[in-house]
Image: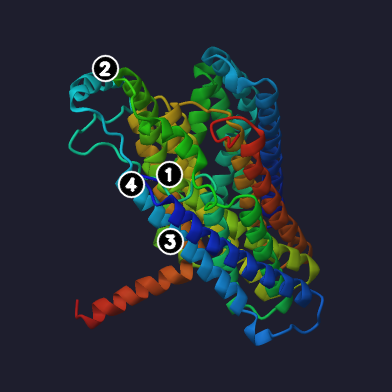
Amino acid sequence: MDSLLPMTAFTLAGRFIMHALLVFSCAAGISGVVDLFRSTPLFARRSGILPGCVAVLFVGGFLWICWFHYQIFTHISLELPAGMVDWLNRQLAAANRGQAYGLPLYDPVSPPRYCIPVWIENEKYFFWFMSFGLMAFWTHCRMENHRLRAVLRIFLGIQACILFFVADPFQNPLPKFFAEIAPWFDAGQNPMARFGLFMRLYPKMVFYYNAEYMWFHPPLLFLSYAAITMTFIASIFMLARREQSVEAMGYAYAKFGYFMLTLGMLLGYPWALKAWGPNWWWDPKICSSIMMWAIFSTYLHTRLYANKKWMWYFTSVLGILCFAAMVFTFLASFFFPGEHTFQ
Amino acid sequence: MKKKGSYDYYLILATVGVLFVISLICVFGMFYFKAAQIQQMAPAVKAAYMNRMNTVVAPFVIMLIALLGICIPKRLLPARWLDWFAGGLLVVASGVSVVMGVLKGLLVVLFAALVLQVVVLGLAVAGSRRLHFEKTGYWVRVGSSLVHLGLVLFVLDLFFYEQQTLHLVLFWITTGATVAGMLCCFYSESVVRLIKGSRQRNADAGL
């Protein structure tokens, strides 16, 4: 792949961003731990600099990932010899007959290209944590509570460590994708083997990598995950002390998170119909997502009565439960097999 | 008013209870799916599994739809009428179920809920003060009505999953209603600012 794509440049610059992210986030996290146990914060006026740097680095890294995907779009296509086109299109037309959602015919003038969304494989963690980083920075600038600010910085530190040590998107970029398409660029394949490979790669390109829903369904869910994390932090503070501004902050993120979650789940539905056909699939991830949505709905309804003493605490417990359900839903992709599995 | 409070309370308890049972069935389904390796089975075995799970969950979905049918009119009707309405609806739905099947009975409940929710939305848009909402504010009420209309439409849409065009059209209407409803409900102040700003601009332009 090195001859086709600027892999080395992407990895080198990306690793630099990741190291800088780790340094700044860990510094933010350590300062957060210190501030959490002090009655007055250290460097109160400058405490926003570190989360600000982290947010800038996240955005820079994300733009770098976007550039790399543009390189994939411009340099990688599933091009077939001219003599094969008519035969292939006859096969595709025959396969499409009677199907509700068929595969587009091959156009030799513009062979199919990979237009991959910027939140697949390890990149999804980067997008998710970037969303949290931006929300944390925004909240850090607006809230006065120094302990809340400290916890936000601790979460930034934890997430950057996860990203750096477990899910670095730059160290080995898109390993599954490149493992899938690497045989396509092997020299000396006979035409029938190439045709067979095309028929394996093309449906996945159409229904997964290039699916328009990939641009909406996953990012909306990751935005909601980031917002749920903010609501979780606010809920912990609500359990400790009745502070109206923290509750208002948690509710604002809960509304945003619920909006994104509902829209994201809804937009996944027509895609599922296209890919799996009309049925209730009993897919583990869908089951757990519906549970999370039900808990979140309950949280928003109980919040209407949050001015009553016990409802205040019940609402905050539900906010924490929402976060637990989100973690369970996300980890379900690793543990349970199904259409959403990461196994 | 005390009666309405208790009525609401029991409806919420019943809804939470049914949702809890459905969640437990979902969790059971997840672990069973993994333990029985359904993913690697032949399509016929997968289909049999889905049908079995559908059968297990069906009574609770029916209960949820019945609760939806009882919950919707609480915005419109005084508390003392709700019992009569709920009883009447259940009798009609049970009668239709006995004569024409359970699916038709559920459709009756859903259509009744849909008609009532459309009336609620119409009254909310007209600014009626006779509706019973927890929150005040014109856009919050319109938004809440739209979100609940979206919910009713979504459940109704599941009945038409085999009619692809109708299913998708209804689905996009559901999505539109839900999104517009959440925007109005959650960001009512921004909606008001947007509309006032637009009116101001039109006034400045002499329109």
Q: Determine which of the numbered discs, if any, sits on residue A94 in the image.
A: 2
The residue drawn where x is 71% and y is 59% is A315
From the image, state whether disc 3 or disc 1 is nearer to you: 3
Mark-to-mark CA distance, 2 and 4: 28 Å
User: Residue at label 3?
Assistant: A63
Residue A178 x %, y %: 45, 39
Mark 3 Cα shell of 10 Å, populated few (<14), some (14-19), many (≥20): few
Q: Chain of mark 4?
A: A
**Amino acid type at image mark 4:** Phe
Mark-to-mark CA distance, 3 and 2: 41 Å
The lab-note entry on whether marks 3 and 1 share a chain reads: yes
User: Residue at label 4?
Assistant: A73
Q: Decide if residue B148 is in sight here.
A: no
The reply to whether callout 2 and callout 1 are in contact (CB within 8 Å) is no
**Precedes in sequence: disc 3 or disc 2:** 3
Mark 2 Cα shell of 10 Å, populated few (<14), some (14-19), many (≥20): few
Indicate the secondary structure of the residue bearing disc 2. Answer: helix
**Precedes in sequence: disc 1 or disc 4:** 4
**Amino acid type at image mark 2:** Ala
**Precedes in sequence: disc 2 or disc 1:** 2
Residue B45 x %, y %: 58, 14
Q: Quadrant of residue A227?
A: bottom right
